[in-house]
Amino acid sequence: MRVIHYGLGPIGVGIARLVLERGWTITAAIDIDPEKAGRDLGTVLGTSRLGVEVTADASAALRRSADVVVHATGSRLGEVLPQLEAAVAAGYDVASTCEELAFPWFHHPGAAQRLDALAQKSRVSVVGLGVNPGFVMDLLPILLTAPCREITRVTVERVVDAAQRREPLRRKIGAGLTTAAFRAGVRAGRLGHVGLVESVAMIADALGWPLRRISEDIQPVPGRGARVAGLHQVARGFRAAPGWGGRAAVRLELRMAIGARRPHDAVTIQGTPAQRLEIPGGIHGDLATWAIVANALPALREAPPGLWPVSRLPLLHFVGARPVSPSPVSPP
């Protein structure tokens, strides 16, 4: 597989290293950071020289021969849509870590329809990937509904000790701010985890539940002194069906803070039969995102043209270093 890497922040660099470990070829790399542009990609990744120069010129890089673009530049779909469209128009499949791309049809239907139409015209596939959204609070609970005859509610709780995560994430959750500054940042849209509402919409779509609305609430988690340790964010999906009233059919709760106690991921499916899964310690966001993107690339290459949520791709799993297009299924 030949890969172009678009964005070499902490997430993009981690994915690129894993792509190389899998034995795939990186043909071009794009980043506007002057500390990276003009340098050999291997130097940026901390590996041996690769003979691939990082460039800030995306249009030139997107003329290189490749199969797929791994895109990791931003969280908001409106900000990165031109980048995605350029990659799609150039004829590449695209795997993006843009959180709002995980399931854009509920809150960004116009952009989703536009990108889907372009992908179909270019005969390529596009998917938003990651650990959250993209796995722990949407794909995993969807998978756990498989043994159920009926379902009444889906609840997911994720607790993350942000002290173990990268600095940009700690800034995004408002760690170290005053409460007033935190609330101002939330109102301005600068603070808060992006993608929780997309996870709600993805779960509802998979279960065939039309939603009346999705609500989201973000509150500070108190820290030392007058400073904030992080955030407590809750998203709720309300079904557009008789008898549901004010009850949320999907409830996703995220507590991400410096020193958060008992980190874990927990999924509860209320139904017949009921399901409960808890992962002590939780799934590490950065490490899992790198792996999920790399493991999804073969499935993306085989997907029909269009924009897809990860829930509609073939079952994702560890792929290791093996051919992208395996032989037809046969007994082991």
Image: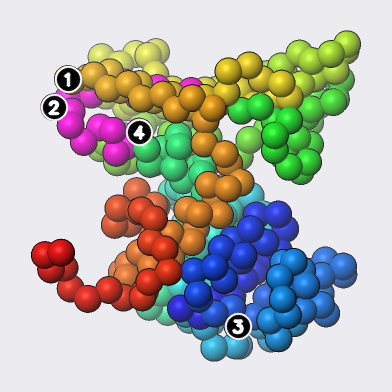
Q: Position of residue 136 (x, y in %)?
A: 45, 37
Please name the residue shown 37% across and 14% down the image. 247
> What whole-number distance in Å separates the C-alpha atoms at marks 3 and 4?
36 Å
Q: Secondary structure at mark 1?
A: strand
> What whole-number distance in Å separates the C-alpha atoms at marks 4 and 2?
15 Å
- Residue 315 vs 67, above or below: the answer is above
Query: What residue is pinned by disc 2?
Result: 149
Q: Which residues are magenta?
A: 141-159
Q: Nearer the viewer, mark 2 or mark 3?
A: 3
- Residue 127 vs 56, above or below: the answer is above
Splitting the image into 4 quarters, where does residue 117 fall?
bottom left
Query: What residue is pinned by disc 3?
Result: 27
* Residue nearer the viewer, 295 or 190: 295
Q: Please report whichever mark, 3 or 4, sits nearer to the chain's N-terminal start.
A: 3
Q: Amino acid at mark 3?
A: Thr
Splitting the image into 4 quarters, where does residue 240 fall?
top left
Q: What crowding class fits label 2: few (fewer than 14 Cα within 10 Å), some (14-19), or many (20 or more)?
A: few
Assess whether mark 1 and mark 2 are in contact (beta carbons under 8 angstroms): yes
Please name the residue shown 54% across and 88% down the image. 65
Query: What residue is pinned by disc 1?
Result: 272
Q: Amino acid at mark 1?
A: Thr
Assess whether mark 2 and mark 4 are in contact (beta carbons under 8 angstroms): no
Query: What residue is pinned by disc 4?
Result: 141
Q: Secondary structure at mark 4?
A: helix
* The stretch drawn in magenta includes residue 23: no
Could one spot residue 327 in this view of the protein?
A: yes
* The stretch drawn in magenta includes residue 143: yes
